[in-house]
Image: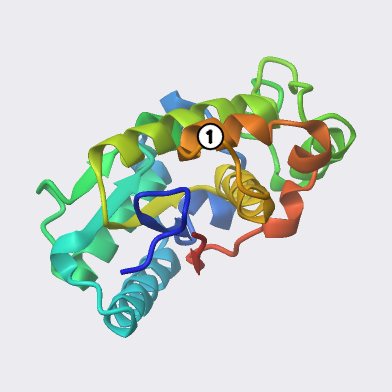
Amino acid sequence: MTTSSFSRNKYWVLRHGKSIPNERGRIVSSMENGMLSEYQLAPEGVNQAELAGKSFLKELKENNIPLENVRICYSPFARTSHTAKVVASALNIPFDGPQCRVIEDLRERYFGPSYELMSHDRYTEIWALDEKDPFLRPEGGESVDDVVARLASAVATMESEYQGCAILVVSHGDPLQILQTVFTSISQQEESNSKDLASRIQAVRIPSILSQHRKYGLLTGELRSVI
């Protein structure tokens, strides 16, 4: 398996399947609410996760990657852990085994108390703020850069613990589009003195890059190879 010059592993991202909050058109971004089982996948989302698992299996076979080299790292929210569990089943990997791991830093972006449990329509307000200044926090919530900081920590964990693996990162819309923004910018950089991925992430934490994250939006249940 070929990895990039700056990572020890090959990465795919998967946005969780359609969730109950998606169906209700509600923002559920706090850890407290996100962990509730009432906010797991809707039936359509389970089907999306199964299809994503089958697509991932096909890509693994095309790349001659054995299942023992697969790691599924996922957000602790109900909708992402549910998705990861369905994918693990599709791959015939034990969800409670060492190949599947919850990483808290992959959780949903917290949009703040004034947005929590409000209509999805209000995402546009946040994204407009992001475009102006990705370092600006919605009141009580996380900025784009705040999310980058903890994604860098998650990547550092995965890079230190795994080598030569195919890692499926199961997370949420905003964190995954932010992660793709960072990975794309890193891959476009010229050779850097810093070889490790976590250090390279730090180097692209600038407004002109982070404000572009909406370019990398994912549909629910969408799988994408990143690096």
Q: Is the residue 129 above or below the residue 66 in the image? A: above
In the image, 222: left or right of 37? right
In the image, 15: left or right of 97? right
In the image, 189: left or right of 133? left
Residue shown at the point (75%, 57%) measured from the top left: 215
Quarter of the image where the N terminus is located: bottom left
**Residue nearest the viewer, comparing 132 with 200:** 200
Q: How is the image coloured?
A: rainbow
Looking at numbered disc 1 in the image, what kind of residue is underneath it? Answer: Ser
Residue shown at the point (48%, 39%) measured from the top left: 195
Q: Is residue 109 visible?
A: no
Q: Is the residue 22 above or below the residue 54 in the image? A: above
**Residue nearest the viewer, comparing 119 with 111:** 111
Furthest toward the right, the residue is 132
Residue shown at the point (76%, 31%) measured from the top left: 206
Q: Quadrant of residue 140?
A: top right
Picture coordinates of residue 102 (x, y %)?
A: 28, 38
Picture coordinates of residue 32 (x, y %)?
A: 43, 24
Query: What residue does disc 1 label?
Result: 194
Picture coordinates of residue 129 (x, y %)?
A: 85, 33
**Residue nearest the viewer, comparing 36 with 108:** 108
Picture coordinates of residue 125 (x, y %)?
A: 83, 37
Q: Is residue 96 visible?
A: yes
Q: Quadrant of residue 154?
A: top left
In the image, 103: left or right of 31? left
* Pointer 1 local density, CA inside 10 Å: few below 14, some 14–19, many at least 20: few
Q: Secondary structure at mark 1?
A: loop
